[in-house]
Image (cartoon, rainbow, N blue to C red):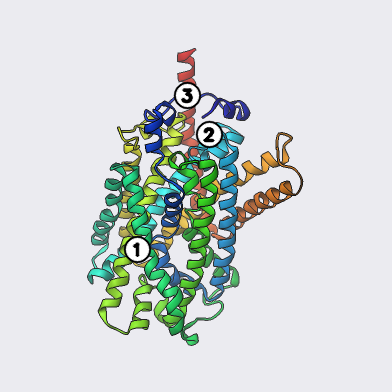
Amino acid sequence: MADTMHARAGAPESTARAPGDLGQMSGRDRQKARALGLTSATGLVIGSIIGTGVFTMPAVLASAGTMSLLVLGVIAIGAMLLAVLFGQLTRRVPTADGGLYAYARHEFGDFAGYLTGWCYWIQAWAGNAAIVSAWVFYVDALFGIHPSGIGNWGIALTGLWIPVVVNLAGVRQMAWFQNVTVALKFLPLLFVAVVGWFFVTSANFGAFNASGGSLYDAIGIAAGVALFSFIGVEVAAITAKRVTDPRRNVGRASLLGTAASAILYMLASAAVMGLVPHHDLINNGAPFVNAFAAIFGQGAWAGKLVASLAVASGIGALNGWTLVTAEVSRAVAADGLFPRAFAWTDRKDSAWFSIVAAAVLPSVLMLWSYTTATGLKVFTDLVDLTVVTVAIPYLFSACAQLTYLVSRRRRVQGWLLGRDLAIAGASVLFSLWVTFAAGYQAVYQALIIVLGGIVLYAFVAARRQDSRKASS
C-alpha cells in the first residue's frame, strides 16, 4: 500500500509485494495488465452477479411466496447503494488494490484489513461452490443425466477447473471469455423477462407467504438467496488493479452492472413464478427449463436450449469469480497479511497460486457437500454460508466511508456531505439487516469463520514482527 495510507491508518509497511506489481512494470506492460475497460469491467460485474444462481433463484423465492419479490427489490436498492459506495471509496483511497480489503485497512489498520480480506476470500471461493452446485442442475438437465452425489461432484470439478485454465491464459483472454458468456446468459433471461409475460398465468403464483412459517421466516428465506444473487457488485473494486482509469470506471461499472442485473432479476424471476405452477416450482433445481416448456410446449429442444445457455452462464460466472478470488488473496498477501504464495505471479502477472487455490478449496467443499446433502439443499446451504461472510466486508467498507465523513479530514461539504452520509449510513444499516435476516445458523457459521481467522492472524502477526526485527 501507499505510504500515505500507512501513515493515515497507522499500519506498518508491507513486508511482501507481488513480483508482478504494477508499480514495478513498464508503461506498456502496465497498460496490458490493466486490460479491463469500462465495457469489460461492467461485463465482469454483470457476469459475476448473474451466474447460474439466477437460473435457480425463482424456485427458492417461490418457497417463500410472492412477498419474496418485494425482498428482492429491497436487496436490489441496497446493492446499488453499495455500488455507489464502492465507487466513492475507490476514488478516495490512495491504493485500492483489493477493494473492500483495501478500504478497511486504509481506515482501520492491518487487523481490520486482514479480517475483511479473510471473510471476503472465504465467501468468494465458497460462493464458487454455490454457483457450481446450481450449474450442476443444468448440466444434468442438458444431458438428461441424474448421477449420484459423487457423480455430481465430478461434474462440479469440470465447472471449477475450466475457469482456472482461462484465467491462467491471461487477463485479456479472461475478459474476452467473460464478455462472450455475459452475452449468452442474457439471451434466456431477456426472453423470459419480456416474452414470458405474455404466457403468465396468475393462478401459478403462490401465496404471499408460502413458507409455512411467520413472515420473518419467509423474509429470511428470500433475503438469503436474493443477497447471494447480488454478490458481485464489488468485483470491479476488488479488481481495480486490472481496470483502466479505476477512479472513474470502478464506480460506473459497479452501478451500471448492478442496475442492469437488478432489472433483469425482477422481471425474469416474477415471470418464471407466473409461468410455472407453484407446486412444480418449489424444490426445482432448473426452473427455467419448465418456464421455456410453458412458452414453447413440452418439446425437448426448448429445455435443452435454455439448459445449454445456463451452463454457459455458469462457466462465465465461475470465470469471473475465479479472478476475483485470486485478486483479493493476492492483494492481502502482497501486504504480508496472507501467506506469500498467494502473491506469486507468472510472466503474464497472473497470480497462479491464488487461481489454483480458488478451485482447490471449493472442490473440497463440494465433495463434503455432496456427501452430506442432496438436491436444492446443497445450493441453499452454500448460499447461507456466503451471505453473512460477505455482509461483514460490506459493513467494514461502509464504516470506513462513515469514519472519513464524520472526521475533520473530509473534503466533502454541504449537500454533498448529506448525500454521502445517507449512502454510507444506508449501507451500514443494509449490511446489518442482511446479517439479521440471514438467520441464526448462518450467523453462527460466520462467527466460527471469523474466530478461525483471528487464530490464523496470531501466526501472521508473529511472522510480521519477526520480519521487522530481522530487518532492524
Q: Which residue is drawn at the image coordinates 24% and 65% (left, top)?
A: 148
Mark 1 — residue? 184
Mark 2 — residue? 95
Mark 3 and mark 2: Cα distance apart in space:
21 Å
Mark 3 and mark 1: Cα distance apart in space:
46 Å
- At mark 1, the secondary structure is helix
Indicate left or right for 411 with 258 as reference: right
Q: Which residue is drawn at the image coordinates 47% and 44% (left, top)?
A: 238
Vertical relation: 443 (above or below) 341: below
Disc with the residue nearer the chain's start (1 vs 2): 2
Mark 3 — residue? 464
Decide which of 53, 454 is in the foreground and name it.
53
- Residue 177 image offset from top left, x and y in percent: 32, 52
Q: Residue furthest top?
A: 472
Closer mark to the observer between disc 1 and disc 2: 1
- The amino acid type of the residue labelled 3 equals Arg
- Label 1: few (<14), some or many (≥20) within 10 Å? some
Q: Which residue is drawn at the image coordinates 35% and 43% (left, top)?
A: 171
- Residue 165 image offset from top left, x and y in percent: 27, 46
Decide which of 284, 367 is in the foreground and name it.
284
